[in-house]
Image (cartoon, grey):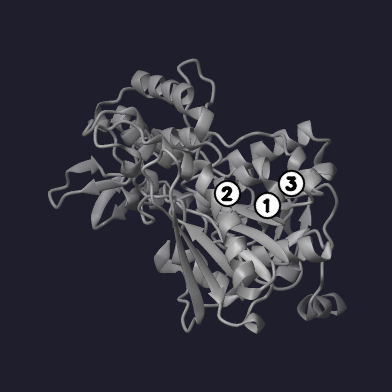
Amino acid sequence: MLDILPPVTNLNFCEVNIHLTHSGADDDVLVRVWLPLKLNDWNSRFQVTGGGGFATSMAFVGLAPAIQQGYAAVSTDGGHDEFSWTSLEWVLNPDRTINWDLWHNFMQRSVVEQILIGKNIVEQYYGERPRHSYWNGCSQGGRQGYMLAQKYPDLLDGIMAAAPALNLVSISMGGYWPQLVMKEADTYVSGCEFAYFTKKIMEACDMLDGIEDSVIMDPDGCKFDPGSLVGNEFVCDGQEVKVTASMADVVRKIRDGPRSPLGAQIWHGLTPGTNYATLANITITPGGVRSQGPIALPVLETLLLPPNFNLSSITPIDYFALWAQAAVEWSWTMATESTDLTALRDSGTKLLTWHGITDDVIPYQSTVEYRKRVQREMGGANEVDKFYRLFLAPGVGHCALGLGPLPTDPLAALVDWVERGNAPETIDAATVDSAGEAITRQLCKWPAKPEYMGIGDPKRSSSWTCVGGTKRSETVYDSDVLKALED
């Protein structure tokens, strides 16, 4: 993700590093606070930055943009390597038992402590407390935000938690599903071949919203059958390829997601238009030999299986048994899915979430299902909307990737909600197409979906509206649409 983030330069700030340890724990936790140098440079707000992968924080990746916007900001390494995004080796003692102190830091303790310490440092530096405090995180940072919303919402005024990893067991086990499917079929679909299926899916479903833009607005409406491509021939990496029934079945099973031996679906599949190759990750030697490349599955590889275990030896029965084992042994700490948000509601703190519909790491359906459970238990959609709102981003992958318009500043929408009472019905999003032309959209408050109004430039957000929600979103017409109406 680092290579797609815009560079942040010419920052002037004071850095305060605090090291702390916990009684009975052999840990050394770094809390890093960045402060705009002058009081006049500070926007009187405090931003707490979340982690990514299996790192407690994103360090400078989160801190630098916060400083650029005038926030005082904080991050923490949780007592382990702060760049361990794809590894859980740090949680193991030399004898490979679990270091529960570090695990507790990662899951909860350090996440909370950085808020308390950071606020204290801010007050000492500026002589006044932050006027408002915000959480900002995606993926692991999204999970941390939900943990705070469920347990400690009074520490913050607003929580921006994107693409939350609400259940690390299911995400890890589900992440291995594409590789298991291919192994069982003895059919290893390459990235280029997956791209062919995606192209054909787009040809069939892209225009469902009336606009050809390589974005499937509503994947539930895409009923494309991969089996319809069997027998098709195409060139892939310089080689002639014919689609087989086995290849089509692999694509279908990845799309549908894992089912138990009795046929019950136990995890979400990857929506049409998603990059299946991320989790499949097939490598091909110069001689044409295909094999499963490594993917980061730390829960499976580090916490459940012995060292150097050959993942390719896992059978479907092993797979579901491991899933059950992981759920029993780890869900108590890895599942951040409490639907009791009473404390959040009563604190006045606001929770704002967005999730990319083509997320190839954390299926967006997990966030939608969580939101549905919350509103079933807390008075319905209108009541929950008062403190918790969800926005889906068509065509957007995990946190920032994909072809769809990306939220431009969801934190600003949260600030406007918290400080001015302007609860967002839409969130601004933008991207640039293959021709370099800007495309703007407004993401709709779930469950509303974007719909092209049939007039005006479809590349402009003013030509779209949100339909199907608890109430129809208001649309601001720009000059292009007004002119079209006049004509």
Q: Which residue is mark 2?
A: 112
Residue at (43, 61) in percent of width and height: 1
* Apparent side of residue 74 relative to residue 126 in the rendered image (left or right): left
- What secondary structure is marked by label 1? helix
Q: Which mark is residue 347?
A: none
Which of 433 and 79 lies nearest the eye of the viewer?
79
Amino acid beneath label 2: Val
Residue 162, compared with residue 344, is above or below; it is below
Residue 395 lies left or right of residue 482; in this view the side is left
- Quadrant in the rendering for residue 411: bottom right
* Residue 430, horizontal then vertical, whole percent: 61, 69
Name the residue beneath numbered marker 3.
447
Residue 199 located left or right of residue 218:
left
Identity, as a three-letter code, of the amino acid under mark 3 = Pro
Which numbered disc, 3 or 2, marks the residue that appears first in the sequence? 2
The residue located at (81%, 73%) in the rendering is: 477
Mark on residue 155?
Answer: 1
Q: Secondary structure at mark 2?
A: helix
Seen from the viewer's position, the closer of residues 170 and 102 is 102
Q: Earlier in the sequence, mark 1 or mark 3?
A: 1
Q: Vertically, is 428 above or below 323?
A: below
